[in-house]
């Protein structure tokens, strides 16, 4: 069985962990081997890779709908894991310090589940998930202990649309730390050649290879929703083996159909009105583990940086 056998503590347990100093680098409980750090931004091509990023599962007992819409909070936990274990940043909540938690340790499973839930609260989780803007707010809350200890923290978002060098932005911001990348799931729209967003997913980027100003990028992802053993046995109370999934992003100009949303404060059902069309730039995501009935189109990413 792919999963490491774990005995989960109750998901409603109080978040608690005793702070203790750790080494400045801890790749053992991060990105699976082989992993060699890369930071090549010289010349027309780039190659960037971050080691020591966790690959935590989003599907967990104790989260609403077993974590089905917790990809955003979980991918942000992977980012915080990197800063805590690789850079010794004191990040966390109250007495819970991410530096003290090992996602592969059975004793830490329940606390990590609760930490993901806490991120969801801070990111204003709704039944359908979270968005990049609110996840940046959750990052700011989780990194307050670091700022109190003299660290500086910064974060921002980058869109694919009207961006002259999205590929280069991915590389430069990944060089600072792992990214949160969002893609929409696009289905056929009402007219021939149009596409309509039908949902989305958020993952953690750990590696990028490509060219500045290029139209394709090769990435490695820590995807919280794509464990090989998803649905097997006690998968809701165990941690999967870490993976780094290979994908390719290809620049596309698409005709997107945007339906009208219903305003709950009016008697009229606005969703019955005809929608609108717009031309937007997206980066289509393809890979052996990303085959389905919709087309994944990357829309943007969150970046994070810390220093002391």
Image (cartoon, grey):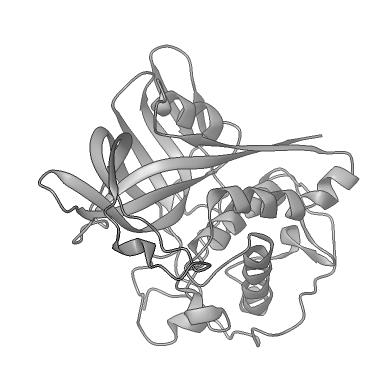
Q: Is residue 113 above or below residue 259?
A: below
- Tell me the quadrant of the picture where the N terminus can be found: bottom left
Looking at the picture, how far across and down is residue 237, in whole percent?
52, 83
**Residue 80 drawn at (x, y percent):** 65, 52
Whether residue 5 is visible to the viewer of this picture, yes or no, is no
* As drawn, 193 above or below 223: above
Q: Residue 30 falls in which quadrant of the image?
A: bottom right
- The quadrant where residue 100 appears: bottom right
Q: Horizontal placement of 214 versus 71: left or right? A: left
- Point out the image quarter for the C terminus: top right
Q: Residue at x 59, y 48 (%)?
A: 133
Is residue 216 rendered to the left or right of residue 45?
left
Q: Is residue 26 left or right of residue 271?
A: right
Q: Give residue 207's position: percent from left, percent from top.
A: 44, 39
Q: Where does the image place residue 3, in percent across and percent down from the top left? A: 43, 75
In front: 192, or 138?
192
Residue in the picture at 18% in, 61% down: 293
209 is higher (above) or lower (below) than 259: above
Residue that protrudes farthest toward the top in the picture: 43
Q: Nearer the viewer, residue 197 or 274?
A: 274
Residue in the image at 84% along x and 55% along y: 21
Residue 172 appears in the picture as rendered = yes
Depth order, front residue of 119/113 = 119
Left or right: where does residue 99 sit relative to residue 262? Answer: right
- Residue lying at the far front in this picture: please name it: 267
């Amino acid at each position: 069985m792919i999963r490491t056998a774990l005995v989960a503590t109750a998901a409603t347990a109080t978040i608690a962990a005793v702070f203790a100093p750790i080494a400045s680098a801890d790749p053992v409980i991060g990105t699976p081997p082989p992993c060699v750090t890369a930071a090549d931004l010289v010349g027309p091509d780039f190659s960037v890779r971050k080691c020591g990023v966790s690959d935590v599962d989003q599907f967990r007992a104790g989260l609403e709908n077993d974590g089905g819409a917790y990809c955003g909070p979980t991918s942000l936990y992977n980012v915080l894991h990197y800063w805590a274990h690789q850079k010794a940043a004191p990040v966390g909540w109250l007495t819970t310090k991410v530096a003290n938690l090992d996602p592969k340790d059975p004793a830490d499973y329940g606390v990590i589940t609760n930490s993901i839930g806490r991120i969801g609260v801070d990111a204003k989780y709704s039944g359908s998930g979270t968005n990049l803007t609110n996840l940046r707010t959750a990052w700011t809350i989780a990194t307050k202990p670091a700022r109190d200890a003299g660290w500086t923290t910064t974060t921002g978002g980058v869109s694919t649309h009207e961006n002259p060098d999205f590929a280069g932005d991915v590389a430069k911001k990944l060089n600072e730390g792992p990214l949160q990348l969002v893609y929409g799931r696009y289905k056929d729209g009402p007219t021939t050649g149009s596409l309509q967003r039908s949902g989305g997913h958020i993952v953690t980027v750990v590696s990028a290879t490509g060219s500045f100003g290029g139209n394709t990028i090769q990435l490695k992802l820590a995807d919280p929703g794509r464990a090989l053993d998803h649905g097997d046995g006690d998968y809701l109370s165990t941690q999967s083996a870490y993976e780094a999934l290979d994908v390719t992003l290809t620049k596309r100009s698409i005709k997107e159909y945007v339906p009208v949303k219903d305003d709950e404060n009016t008697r009229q059902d606005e969703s019955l009105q005809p929608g609108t069309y717009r031309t937007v730039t997206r980066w289509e995501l393809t890979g052996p583990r990303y085959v389905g009935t919709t087309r994944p189109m990357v829309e943007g990413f969150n970046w994070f940086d810390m220093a002391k």
